[in-house]
Amino acid sequence: MMEAQPIYWTHYVATCLFALGLLGFLIRKNAITVLMCLELMLNAANLILVELSMRTGTPDGIIMVVFVITVAAAEVAVGLGIVLNLYRLKETVELDAFKSLQG
Amino acid sequence: MKELFFIFFSLYTIAAALGVVLAKNPVYSAFSLILSFFGLSALYVMWGATFIGMIQILVYTGAIVVLFVFVVMLLDLGSVVTDHSHSWLTVMVSAIAVWFFSLLMLRTFNHTPLVAPATPLAESNTRLISQLLFTEYLWPFEILSIFLLALIIAIYALTRPDAADKRKVHP
């Protein structure tokens, strides 16, 4: 019995979200907005994990999402701490201002 | 009816994400991010992952975005409109690269063979998640808690006031 391949629109939604996050990561210059775009990419990955987990009937993907959310919170805290230090150094958060490797 | 809600929340989430990328002001980006997370939470609940939907609202909009807005307020960037955009060439090349990358991702997602569920997950699977978290996934859970403890110390060392003064460069 052959059926047409069903279209899973969640794949398209997650890909759109990931693409938007990646695009923002590449074209934005504000360090804080770049961190927000990172969050968008992590959320696209979470959406795919939840969808596949529910479709295959295994709860492992959902537990992975719990871990991802925890690590995302940690990553934001560290990232914003670094942004604070950068602002103290150069009085700006534009990423183009940070060119020298030697602080 | 469910399809209608799914389409609505999908478009809403993508529109809010577009707002994050395109807004010039970081405060507007942060609030678009909140809207996007609410839409994502609705999508999780529609897939049956109610616990993740709740955690999404509590942790993401309650903690992470508040942290973003707090840092924007602390640095007094709210009134600064950052208008230094990249050149059109950079934007076009980035968009084309992202386009090809997303085509690749879609192909991978759509052509991955999946085993049909013998028993689909129940609508309320919070009990199952918590049981797994404390039996099969106990070690990752504990490692994560130690990781968070290390993180608290690291962030304190990173952002304490006298740490930046020592490194400050006087041009």
Image (cartoon, coloured by chain):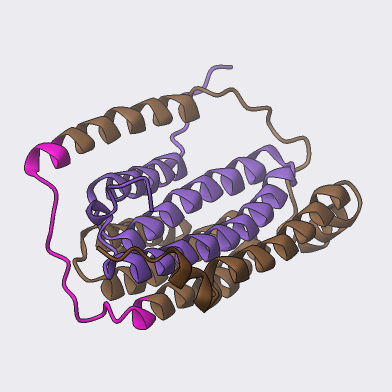
Chain colours: A purple, B brown
Answer above or below: position of A53 versus B118: below
In the image, taking residue B123 as reference, residue B163 lies left or right, namely left
Location of residue A103 by image quarter: bottom left
In the image, taking residue B170 as reference, residue A39 lies left or right, namely right
Residue lying at the far left in this picture: please name it: B88
Answer above or below: position of A1 versus A83: above
Q: Residue at x 59, y 74 (%)?
A: B58
Quarter holding the N terminus of chain B is bottom left
Q: Residue at x 78, y 61 (%)?
A: B145
Q: Is residue B42 visible?
A: no
Residue lying at the far top in this picture: please name it: A1
The percent coordinates of residue A42 (x first, y second) are 49, 50
Q: Residue at x 27, y 77 (%)?
A: B77
Residue lying at the far right in this picture: please name it: B135
Classified by dominant secondary structure, the portion drawn in magenta counts as loop
Q: Is residue B90 magenta?
A: yes
Quarter holding the C terminus of chain B is bottom left
Magenta span of residues: B72-92
In the image, taking residue B4 as reference, residue B126 lies left or right, namely right
The percent coordinates of residue B106 (x first, y second) are 40, 31
Location of residue A77 by image quarter: bottom right
Q: Is residue B113 magenta?
A: no
The percent coordinates of residue B75 (x first, y second) are 34, 78
